[in-house]
């Protein structure tokens, strides 16, 4: 098949209902220059049936089953199967804005980015807990207009990159990122650092947008602590900033800080409106979970 402008790569794992919403949002935007690649990352639900239902509507939908569980495995498989000069990774639970692909073409035609991303706008299908910030689920835009980035600030939910650039920096690190339902991070940050180190150009467009759900499991307090642990583990695994003894020392310092700050945070729940015991727990324990993750990275 001749090269296309764009391959949209949707990596999915046991989210057929959400995948259908994602594909529905893209359906009317696809042109002859665009293909959609679905990487089924060893799902056990009806993902294949959902993809098949789109085949007559979107002739350029291509389905691949990737048995190695892990988002980085799936993303790399998507890159290898893609015919497009550009890859646009979209989360399987994302809903594209109606002008998303027109905006993509506009950026490619007018800017010299090798990789760029855009805005995530969160929404809730389940009631939001009162302790959870109204901003949770929204991406905090690093720029208010289209421009260049000098550090890795793009997220993987909406991540456009030239296929040749991704191949040159060595694809996604398969030791990082989500693995099935196991929380994982840092693979997109690592790619962006490699791009910047090689002189590639990163960009951001706040008008390049998706809606992104805050799913039910992210409304649980424990998920946020596990997320802090995963950020510490995968961030340190990617950066390798500290020796083992240094990470243990940081964990001990965080433990001492907890003993001092926990009573303050609990007292704050009495004094401050809209500050709940869950906020006190997160503010107190998240740093410790993060440091525990850093220590854990040294034993992987």
Image: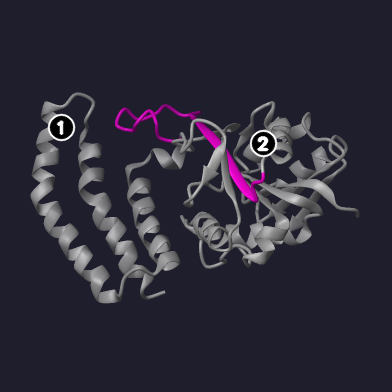
Quadrant hosting residue 36: top right
Type of secondary structure dominating the magenta stretch: loop
In this picture, is 221 found above or below 179?
A: above
- Left or right for 178, reference 268: right
In this picture, is 186 found above or below 117?
A: below
**Which one is nearer the viewer's eye here, 99 or 193?**
193
Q: Per the image, is 277 magenta?
A: no
Q: Per the image, is 124 magenta?
A: yes
- Which secondary structure, mark 1? helix
The residue identified by callout 1 is 269
* Residues rendered magenta in the picture: 112-137
**Which one is nearer the viewer's eye here, 17 or 197?**
197
Q: Residue 150: horizontal and vertical position, in percent?
A: 49, 50
Residue that appears at 67% across and 45% down: 112
Instruction: Please say whether residue 158 is visible from this viewpoint.
Output: no
Q: Residue 285: horizontal and vertical position, in percent?
A: 23, 51
Q: Residue 235: horizontal and vertical position, in percent?
A: 41, 60
Quadrant hosting residue 1: bottom right
In this picture, is 55 found above or below 226?
A: above
Quadrant hosting residue 204: top right
- The Cα–Cα distance between marks 2 and 1, rounded to whole angstroms, is 39 Å
Crowd rating for badge 1 (residues with CA inside 10 Å; few <14, some 14–19, many 20+):
some
**Which one is nearer the viewer's eye here, 113 or 50?**
113
The residue identified by callout 2 is 22
Instruction: Please say whether residue 21 is visible from this viewpoint.
Output: yes
**Which one is nearer the viewer's eye here, 221 or 137?**
137
Residue that appears at 81% across and 38% down: 54
Residue that appears at 39% across and 70% down: 240
- Left or right for 5, reference 280: right
- Number of dots carrying numbers: 2
């Amino acid at each position: 098949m001749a090269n296309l402008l764009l391959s949209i790569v949707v990596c999915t794992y046991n989210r057929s209902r959400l995948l259908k919403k994602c594909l529905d949002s893209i359906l009317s935007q696809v042109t002859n220059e665009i293909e959609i690649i679905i990487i089924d990352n060893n799902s056990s639900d009806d993902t294949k049936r959902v993809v098949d239902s789109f085949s007559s509507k979107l002739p350029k939908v291509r389905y691949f089953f990737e048995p190695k569980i892990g988002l980085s495995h799936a993303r790399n498989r998507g890159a290898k199967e893609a015919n497009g000069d550009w890859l646009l990774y979209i989360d399987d639970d994302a809903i594209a804005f109606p002008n998303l692909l027109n905006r993509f073409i506009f950026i490619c035609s007018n800017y010299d980015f090798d990789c760029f991303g855009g805005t995530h706008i969160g929404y809730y299908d389940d009631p939001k807990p009162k302790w959870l910030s109204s901003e949770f689920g929204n991406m905090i835009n690093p720029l208010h207009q289209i421009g260049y980035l000098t550090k890795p600030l793009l997220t993987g939910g909406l991540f456009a990159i030239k296929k040749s650039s991704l191949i040159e920096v060595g694809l996604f690190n398969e030791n990082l990122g989500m693995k099935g339902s196991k929380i994982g991070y840092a693979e997109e940050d690592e790619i962006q650092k490699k791009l910047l180190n090689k002189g590639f150009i990163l960009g951001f467009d706040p008008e390049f947008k998706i809606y992104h759900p805050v799913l039910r499991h992210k409304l649980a307090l424990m998920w946020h602590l596990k997320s802090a642990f995963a950020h510490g583990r995968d961030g340190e695994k990617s950066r390798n900033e500290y020796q083992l003894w240094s990470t243990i020392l940081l964990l001990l310092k965080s433990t001492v800080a907890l003993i001092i700050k926990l009573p303050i945070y609990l007292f704050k729940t009495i004094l401050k409106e809209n500050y709940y015991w869950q906020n006190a727990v997160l503010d107190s324990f998240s740093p410790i979970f993060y440091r525990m993750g850093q220590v854990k990275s040294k034993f992987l």
